[in-house]
Image (cartoon, rainbow, N blue to C red):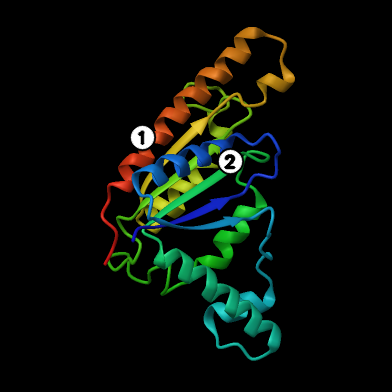
Amino acid sequence: MARLLHIDSSPSPYSVSRRLAGVFRETWAKELPDGDVTHRDLVATPLPHLDADGVHTLLNAPETDAQRTAAALHDELVEEVLSADALLISAPMHNWTIPSHLKAWFDQSLLMGRTLPFDPSVNPLAGRPATVVLAYGGDYGPASPDHAMDHCAPYLRTVLGQVLGYDLEIITASHTVAPFTSQDPADHEKAAVSLREAEGAVAERARVTAAVPARA
């Protein structure tokens, strides 16, 4: 049975990133009706930020009740990551980077020797498909003068692709705030075109992901 780990991080009731993740889920379910999904909504159920007790348990055995609680959370999150055949993350850009909800998930689930390899050549997650769907209020593409302000995709590419070795695809919808902030029809059209293109790319990525054989 194929297993998908789905992480949502947008608090917006108008979330484009959640909408795109929904397209992925719908397509993936059509291709794999018997597939299993673990869904973590980091807004509905926020994870604690890494504190002193959590840091202690990254390298040491827990000694106090608080440390045992922190270690149990690490174990739960690590098991979800390691047991998933594919990963889906949705996120908006918040102040030019990922939401703090999502950063907390990374900090709590990336553990040396478990999800983070000591030896890059021995990587338990290498080659597994990971899809990230991002929503940007403006335009931060390569041709944009604001391109260098994008600290979402580069960070995620570093962690998920370069360090963890996932077969990573990042799909972005841009100009998402235009329908709420601009009276210019051209801006609205840019947003609509970007969303349509992102939805098509997400659906295709879901089909490709569903075709990857599940691990034994």
Quarter of image, res 145: top right
**x, y percent for residue 199:** 47, 30
The quadrant of the image that shows the N terminus is: bottom left
Tell which residue pokes out farthest to the front in this image.
33
How many other residues sit within 10 Å of disc 1, few (<14), some (14-19) or many (≥20)? Answer: some
Looking at the picture, tell me which residue is in the foreground, 199 or 162: 199
Q: Earlier in the sequence, mark 2 or mark 1?
A: 2
What residue is disc 2 on?
18
Element type where label 2 sits in the image: helix
Three-letter amino acid code at the position of disc 1: Glu
- 3 lies left or right of 66: left
Quarter of image, res 3: bottom left
Q: Is residue 70 above or below residue 211?
A: below
What residue is disc 1 on?
204
**x, y percent for residue 137:** 63, 29
Q: Is residue 178 above or below residue 41?
A: above
**x, y percent for residue 151:** 56, 41
Q: Are marks 2 and 1 in contact (CB under 8 Å)?
A: no
Looking at the picture, tell me which residue is in the foreground, 92 or 163: 92
Q: CA distance from mark 2 to mark 1?
A: 17 Å
Looking at the picture, tell me which residue is in the foreground, 90 or 103: 90
Q: Is residue 36 above or below residue 96?
A: below
Q: Which residue: 38% across, 50% down? A: 33
How many other residues sit within 10 Å of disc 2, few (<14), some (14-19) or many (≥20)? Answer: many
